[in-house]
Image (spheres, rainbow, N blue to C red):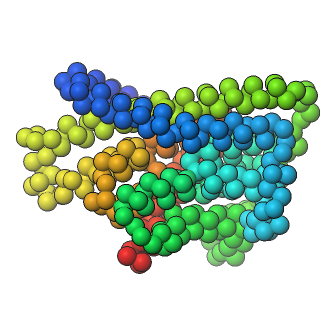
């Protein structure tokens, strides 16, 4: 029954999108071109070099040495080895989806345990600081960025400390008072990577470039598809539709609803269309990242046993914490 409902929903979505593309070819072309332009102008120059360099560092086993200056502090703070510190550094510096990619790459090489990789995936896969300061804050015309940088990066950083350092001691404290006999298993350390055939530098470089090109191509496909999905709410909430009449009758502000749907589908194009009209909405939805970001995260961890469901669950918690933070400071 569940599979039947899933197939029916997907079939309706596919037919609706196809019909919308036929009825409104100019609008559908605009949405698809928006996604393609954002990918070409923003994602490729910003992410492709980092993807290649990160693949090289991992292939040459230099990730631990690369973050030697951060290891003394962050290793103690998060209870991680040098490879985990590298994920934090790249994730917070380069932004989404590099956090997910680097986590999955190191986990596949058994340089991170499953618990470490799952927790790092949750709080290291965020919107990049360059994107946030140069695009979001300028669009929202925010003059004092400090409180918003804390909201965007301070909350995930503290949440990461909770996940990796504080959660297990807290669970041990409340375990005697919890119903049932829940056994807390000790932290599993990363397995030792089996001996691999030695590769030359040019072989590693070639593999790094091909892997980066494959990853960036997937991101482009997701950005085009999820931008195109904006066609459906646009048509539903256009003039003289039953859905628009229902929203008006229920006193639901249609512009806010449309802005929220746009941001949830594809965050960059959604923010571009929303502009500075709904700053609170934009700031709250940024930690979640939108459904396009979730799909792209899945493409990065595909082939591992890391849980996308847990990732989405904790992203929802981070979104709620961010909303509470902004309600307090705004």
> Looking at the picture, does residue 330 appear above or below residue 299?
below
Depth order, front residue of 67/172: 67
> x%, y% of residue 234?
23, 40
> x%, y% of residue 306?
65, 44
Depth order, front residue of 184/10: 10
Which residue occupies the extreme left position in the image? 240
**Tag count in the figure?**
0
Q: In this view, does 139 lie to the left or right of 314?
A: left
> x%, y% of residue 29?
30, 27
The residue located at (81%, 24%) in the rendering is 203
The residue located at (72%, 31%) in the rendering is 208
The residue located at (72%, 68%) in the rendering is 165
**Quadrant of the rendered image containing residue 197:** top right
> x%, y% of residue 50?
66, 42
Q: Quadrant of the C terminus?
A: bottom left
Q: In this view, does 28 lie to the left or right of 149?
A: left
Q: Is residue 36 visible?
A: yes
Q: Can residue 19 be seen in this view?
A: no
**Quadrant of the rendered image containing residue 194:** top right
> Looking at the picture, does residue 59 appear above or below residue 24?
below
Which residue occupies the extreme top position in the image? 22
> Looking at the picture, does residue 199 appear above or below residue 55?
above
The residue located at (79%, 56%) in the rendering is 67
């Amino acid at each position: 029954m569940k599979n039947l409902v899933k197939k029916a929903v997907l079939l309706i979505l596919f037919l609706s999108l196809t019909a919308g593309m036929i009825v409104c070819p100019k609008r559908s072309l605009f949405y698809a071109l928006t996604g393609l332009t954002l990918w070409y102008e923003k994602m490729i120059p910003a992410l492709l070099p980092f993807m290649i360099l990160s693949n090289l560092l991992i292939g040459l086993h230099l990730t631990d040495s690369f973050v030697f200056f951060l290891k003394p502090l962050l290793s103690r703070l998060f209870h991680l080895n040098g490879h985990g510190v590298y994920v934090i550094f790249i994730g917070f510096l380069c932004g989404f989806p590099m956090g997910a990619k680097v986590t999955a790459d190191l986990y596949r090489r058994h340089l991170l345990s499953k618990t470490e990789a799952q927790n790092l995936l949750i709080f290291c896969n965020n919107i990049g600081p360059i994107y946030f300061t140069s695009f979001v804050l300028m669009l929202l015309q925010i003059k004092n960025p400090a409180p918003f940088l804390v909201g965007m990066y301070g909350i995930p950083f503290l949440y990461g400390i909770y996940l990796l350092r504080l959660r297990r001691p807290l669970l041990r404290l409340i375990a005697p008072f919890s119903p049932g006999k829940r056994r807390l298993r000790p932290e599993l350390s990363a397995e030792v990577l089996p001996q691999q055939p030695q590769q030359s530098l040019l072989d590693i470089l070639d593999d790094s470039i091909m892997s980066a090109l494959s990853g960036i191509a997937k991101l482009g496909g997701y950005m085009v598809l999820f931008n195109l999905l904006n066609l459906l709410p646009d048509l539903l909430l256009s003039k003289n539709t039953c859905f628009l009449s229902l929203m008006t009758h229920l006193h639901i502000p249609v512009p806010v609803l449309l802005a929220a749907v746009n941001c949830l589908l594809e965050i960059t194009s959604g923010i571009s269309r929303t502009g500075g009209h709904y700053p609170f909405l934009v700031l709250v939805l940024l930690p979640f990242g939108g459904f396009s970001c979730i799909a792209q995260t899945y493409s990065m961890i595909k082939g591992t046993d890391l849980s996308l469901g847990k990732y989405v669950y904790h992203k929802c918690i981070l979104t709620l914490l961010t909303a509470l933070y902004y309600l307090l400071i705004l």
